[in-house]
Image (tube, rainbow, N blue to C red):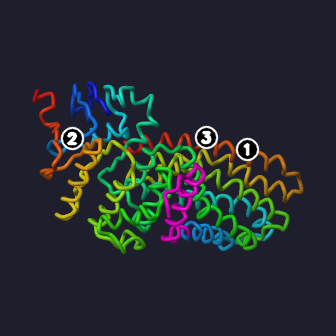
Amino acid sequence: MKRQALGLLACLRATLLRELQIAASSPGKIVNPLMFFVIASALFPLSGRLDLAVLGSIAPGILWVTALLAVMLSMEGLFRSDFDDGTLEQLLLSSQPLYFHLLVKVLGHWLVTGLPLVVIAPLLGLLLNLPAAGYQPLILGLLLGTPTLSLVAAIGTALTVGLARSGLLLAVLVLPLSIPVLVFGAGVVDTALNGLPVAGLFSLLGALLLLAASLAPLAIAASLRISVQ
Amino acid sequence: MLAVDDLHCERDERVLFSRLSFDVTPGSLLQVQGANGSGKTTLLRILAGLNQDFTGNLYWQGRPRASVLNEFQQSLFYLGHAPSVNRTLTPLQNLRWFCALQGYADDSAILAALTAQGLAGYAEIPCHQLSAGQQRRVSLARLELTAAALWILDEPFTALDRLAVAALELRLSRHAAAGGAVVLTTHHPLKTPSPLSILDLDAQRPEAL
């Protein structure tokens, strides 16, 4: 094979591929947040004498809160190994556009940590007696909301990657920023259960995603530059 | 190539170096010396653009570096303390990504570079199964894959065996002879055919002046 010049898209694909290969070789990172999501939501029906109807009505909130915490849990590893082994320095010093590489890196991370949550959420909805009208808004909402959560959490991860133990600090930094997604995400399911139109709330979730996708990489880049100093 | 003018850096209220000025010219090998904690790594990170915590001016090809940052980064190869090798990936996967960051794909060049580092047959083995010295060699295989003119290497001889040290010394002088420049730190006495300039940070500290 001869040397082949790559365009920006092919370079970004290499970053995405690298992210997926790393995930494939350490499956624990994929499974842990998923297990947390399943176990935490499955504990609610066992935790008291909840009326089935009551359980169904709080199911959207339970699923969204546990999904948010599962995303937080998965994010700590996003830049950790790259920071420790020096790869991050290579990325920061490369003449490639950092903005797109970071966006793709978070996308890759979401594909292996966020997307499985979306896929398994309907099963947990069944466990929590979520009424039939709630499934479609739940899945669509998580599909729009979890990437936003990943992007926002990535800013916090980038800021704290230089610290040895960042768990609680990360939560304190990121959880307040995640609240709008949580409110609209759980709200969209609630609204659908009450038979009201949900298009407006979906638009808000979509707008949050676009906002996060366009601004978060800038904040992540700036945070990483501070962290590697 | 890279001109440093009036560089001053403090860390934790301790002056590491002050009024430091030097030029890195094409064909030069510059060895930064100093005791542990004298600021060698800090200086290298400032030169590479990773550390912004300094005062002074840096010029790349005669122009302020900040104004030609992209050009500078295209001409820079930096290797820090850490080998920049992901332990769960194979050498081939690691180097493919490195090449993609340089904007090209070329598996045969990667395999040739690995072979030159004595890693033929290790291309598909996860790096965590390799020894520290072998991981360092994976890292150094990059020298064959980059077109950068300025190499900034922080302790590149760490964990290498005697033969690899000699090969690397030769590689560095070959780069200098081809018009490139190398700035490096090492505690190992360098034996290179090319002329070597030495920057001693211990002599640069204000109390020594």
Secondary structure of the residue carrying numbered label 1: helix
Kind of residue at disc 2: Leu
The x, y position of residue A8, in whole percent, is: 58, 49
Residue named by callout 1: A207
User: Left or right: where does residue A110 sit relative to residue B201?
Assistant: right
Instruction: Check if mark 2's residue and mark 3's residue have beta carbons within 8 Å.
Output: no
Q: Chain of mark 3?
A: A
Mark 3 residue type: Leu
Q: Position of residue A3 (x, y in %)?
A: 49, 57
Mark 1 residue type? Ala
- Do the residues at discs 2 and 3 belong to one chain? no
What residue is shown with label 3? A215
Residue stretch rendered in magenta on the structure: A1-30
Q: Is residue A122 above or below residue A149?
A: below
Q: Position of residue A22 (x, y in %)?
A: 49, 65
Inter-mark Cα distance, 2 to 1: 52 Å
Quarter that holds the C terminus of chain A: top left
Name the subunit of mark 1: A
* Magenta span includes A9: yes
Label 2 belongs to which residue? B30
Give the alpha-carbon distance from disc 2 to disc 3, as whole Å.
41 Å
| Residue toward you, B112 or A139 | B112
Quadrant assignment, res A131: bottom right
Q: Is residue A130 above or below residue B34?
A: below
Q: Is residue B125 visible?
A: yes
Of badges 2 and 3, the one in the foreground is 2
Residue B196 located left or right of residue B89: left
Secondary structure type for disc 2: strand
